[in-house]
Image (cartoon, rainbow, N blue to C red):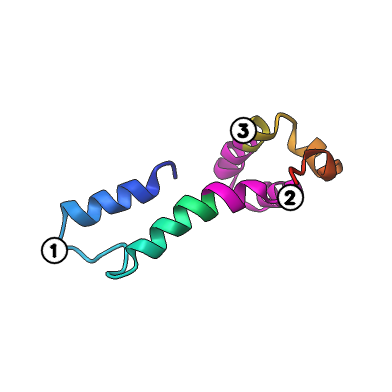
Amino acid sequence: MSNSFDIVQYLDKQYPSSPRVITPGTLAFETAYYKYFLAGVRSKWPTPVHQHLYETVSPESAAFLKTLREEAFGDTLVNLAKNPQLHWDV
């Protein structure tokens, strides 16, 4: 979900009497995870991972994932899976 980390932080601040989504004392870890892992490491996964995810998620999620990954890599998921080294940013 787009901006989900920002939404979670907003909800935790807006509704302080509700159960926390982010465990107290872990905000620094959560921030680092979302900022660095999701933005950096995940975007560098080999393209066959994206094809596998596309084949295993719900049809609604698959359509979104297909569009997102094909736009990001500039090629179809089928071609990306056939030629992963052509799209691997080392």
Residue 31 placement, left or right of 57: left
Under mark 1, the amino acid is Ser
Q: Secondary structure at mark 2?
A: loop
Q: Which residues are magenta?
A: 39-68
Quadrant containing the N terminus in the rendered view: top left
Density class for disc 1 (Cα within 10 Å; few <14, some 14-19, many ≥20) is: few
CA distance for labels 2 and 1: 42 Å
Q: Looking at the magenta stretch, what is its main secondary structure? A: helix
- Whole-percent x, y for residue 6 in the image: 33, 47
Q: Residue at x 57, y 37 (%)?
A: 64
- Whole-percent x, y for residue 75 in the image: 74, 30
Q: Nearer the viewer, residue 66 or 60?
A: 66
Q: Which residue is mark 3?
A: 67
- Whole-percent x, y for residue 18 in the image: 18, 63
**Which numbered disc covers residue 17?**
1
Q: Is residue 63 magenta?
A: yes
**Which numbered disc covers residue 46?**
2
Under mark 3, the amino acid is Thr
Are dots 1 and 3 in contact, CB under 8 Å? Answer: no
Residue 11 placement, left or right of 29: left
